[in-house]
Each structure stands twice: as C-alpha cells, then as structure tokens.
Amino acid sequence: MAGNRYAGAVAFPENILTEDEHVSMHLHPHWREMARPVLVLLLCIAAVVAGFLWLPDGDGGQIALYAIGAVALALVLWLTVWPWIVWRTKHYIFTNERAILQHGVFHRERRDIPLVRVNDHTMNQTLFDRMFGCGTLVIESAGERGQTVLVDVPKVQRVQSLLYELVDSDRDRHSMGDGEFREIMQELKDGNDKG
C-alpha cells in the first residue's frame, strides 16, 4: 500500500485495501461545507464578547452572561463541532481497483464501486462551484444502485480525470496479463511522482 499525499487527518481503515491495491486519491468534501459552522462559531463568540462588554456589573449581568455563554456553547457544539466531525468522517477514496465512499460517525456506511463496473462518470459545476474549485461528480455503475452522487468534491475536474485514468487502466489490466499491467502501473506511478 503506497503512501498518499491526498490523505486527510481522519484516516479511513487501510486494512480494507487488498494486497495489490493502493490509494490514488483520498478526499473529504470541499471546505465550503464548513462555512456555516464557522459563521455560527464567530457569531457565538461575538455574542459572548458583547455580553461581557455591555452587560451591567452585578448579579443580573453575571447571570445573563452565564446564560449567553451556555446557549453559545450549546450552539457551537451542535452547529459547529458536530458538522465538523461529520465532515471529517466523510471520505471519497479512489484506488486502482475501486471508488470507496464512506461516511458516518456512530453508524458507518461504506459503498465500494469496483472500477470494472463504472459505466460513466459526469461532472457538474455551477458558477458558484467553479469559484470555489469544487463540484458534483456522478458515477454511474452497473448494478442495483446505478448512480452515485458525490457532492462538493474538491478539484472535481482533476478527480474526474483521475477516475477516467483509473477506469481505463483497470480495463487494460483485465484485458492483458498481470506482468504487463504492473509495468504500465509503475510507469504511471513514476510519471505522477515526477509531476
């Protein structure tokens, strides 16, 4: 299993990878999903600071400040910390064998899409997405579920290109011998390490 420059701080269990499988890209959703939680954090801090500065001294002011602090803390835990944990535990992982989509804090769900089953993949970016460098990637695969939609994928154009290369390499691997495929994969890896 090769190291990965795209790996995030919250790792996925690498023991789910097969012996010859390596991670090509590991992403979390785009950071813009954290814009609202950060705004809530800043507003709560501002409310506590305003209460500290403008509430009158004495018991009434202290009680009001404690109440503001308690509400602010509850809001930060609910609307900032929890969304951050959810965001950090959502993984988009692309390997040389499959796309792995994993999310969940207490109840984890993982979907594996073997590259050999990928029929089509499309990328969609609104003007707003383009400003932030993210977008939606739809992976269409053979099977019951059909389409899988990945929202707020950072560098979505690059991810779609990588997915194309991985699917193409996987098809080549299944149409030629393992020795020949390993040579091609090594050449691709050496080319990516240089670029």
Image (spheres, rainbow, N blue to C red):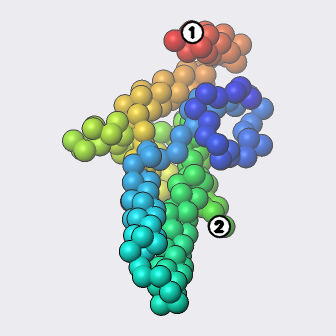
In the image, what residue occupies the spot 73% across and 46% down? 13
What is the three-letter code of the residue carrying label 2? His
In the image, what residue occupies the spot 64% across and 43% down? 9
> Are there few (<14), some (14-19), or many (20+) residues within 10 Å of tag 2?
few
In the image, what residue occupies the spot 50% across and 51% down? 143
Q: Where is residue 45 in the image (x, y as percent from the top left)?
A: 46, 64
Q: Mark 2 points at which residue?
A: 107
Furthest toward the left, the residue is: 127
Q: Mark 1 points at which residue?
A: 194
Q: Position of residue 181 (x, y in %)?
A: 64, 16
SS at mark 1 in the image: helix
SS at mark 2 in the image: loop
Q: In the rendered image, is residue 145 in sight? A: yes
Q: In the rendered image, is residue 114 in sight? A: no
What is the three-letter code of the residue carrying label 1? Lys
Disc 2, disc 1: CB below 8 Å? no
Q: Is residue 130 above or below residue 55?
A: above
* Along the viewing direction, whichever of 33 and 193 lies nearer the viewer: 33
Drawn side of residue 9 relative to residue 43, left or right? right
Residue 24, image quadrant? top right
